[in-house]
Amino acid sequence: MADFKVVLSTPDGKSYQKELKSPQADSLLQRKIGDTLNGDALGFTGYEFQVTGGSDKAGFPMRKGIVTPRKKIFTGKGVGFSGKNRLGEKQPGLEVRKTVCGEVITSQIFQVNLKVLKEGAEKLAPVVSAETAKA
């Protein structure tokens, strides 16, 4: 039994949020970053989505290539790293230790980011706004 906040990004640059509860949210469990999934399982008929990332309940970002639920990594670029030092100045060659979570969606994940690959017959905006108006 899982609950997720899902951020849906469309090709025209807009994004929409929707809260998913079981059993719709259970179709996201054990998916990895980069996986594609059918929108019918999430309540969006005709849509196709790709998992692009997310964050866990503590706010740590998901990072591709990490298989453990949470890990400290030494990084100089990528997800979870801005390239700035403590004073906010850009510093070339800076590497820091950051905590990130793995690429697999588990029950510890709070937010999941999805990219729209294929649009369905209905527009995404009215479907998502109608869902939030009911809540």
Image (cartoon, rainbow, N blue to C red):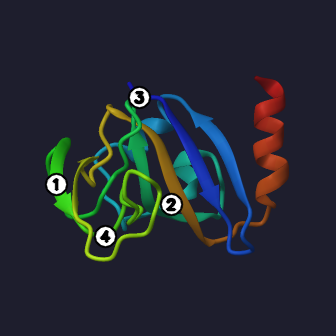
Q: CA distance from mark 2 to mark 1?
A: 33 Å
Mark earlier in primary sequence (2, 1): 2
- The answer to whether marks 1 and 4 mark residues whose Cβ atoms lie closer than 8 Å is no
Identify the amino acid type marked 4.
Answer: Lys
Front in this rendered view, residue 86 or 112: 86
- Whole-percent x and y of residue 102? 24, 50
SS type, badge 4? loop
Is 124 left, or right, of 112 in this rendering?
right
Q: Quadrant of the C terminus?
A: top right
* Res. 35 mark: none
SS type, badge 2? strand
Q: CA distance from mark 4 to mark 3?
A: 31 Å
One can see residue 66 in this view: no
Q: Which residue is mark 3?
A: 2
- The answer to whether marks 4 and 3 mark residues whose Cβ atoms lie closer than 8 Å is no
SS type, badge 1? strand
Of discs 4 and 3, which sits in the foreground? 4
Is 122 left, or right, of 84 in this rendering?
right
SS type, badge 3? loop
- The answer to whether marks 3 and 2 mark residues whose Cβ atoms lie closer than 8 Å is no
Q: Which residue is mark 1?
A: 73
One can see residue 130 in this view: yes
Q: Which residue is mark 4?
A: 77
Q: CA distance from mark 3 to mark 2?
A: 18 Å
Mark earlier in primary sequence (1, 3): 3
Of discs 2 and 4, which sits in the foreground? 4
Q: Which residue is mark 2?
A: 38
Q: CA distance from mark 1 to mark 3?
A: 27 Å
Mark earlier in primary sequence (4, 3): 3
Tell me if mark 1 has few (under 14), some (14-19) or many (20+) residues whose alpha carbon lies within 10 angstroms of its own: few
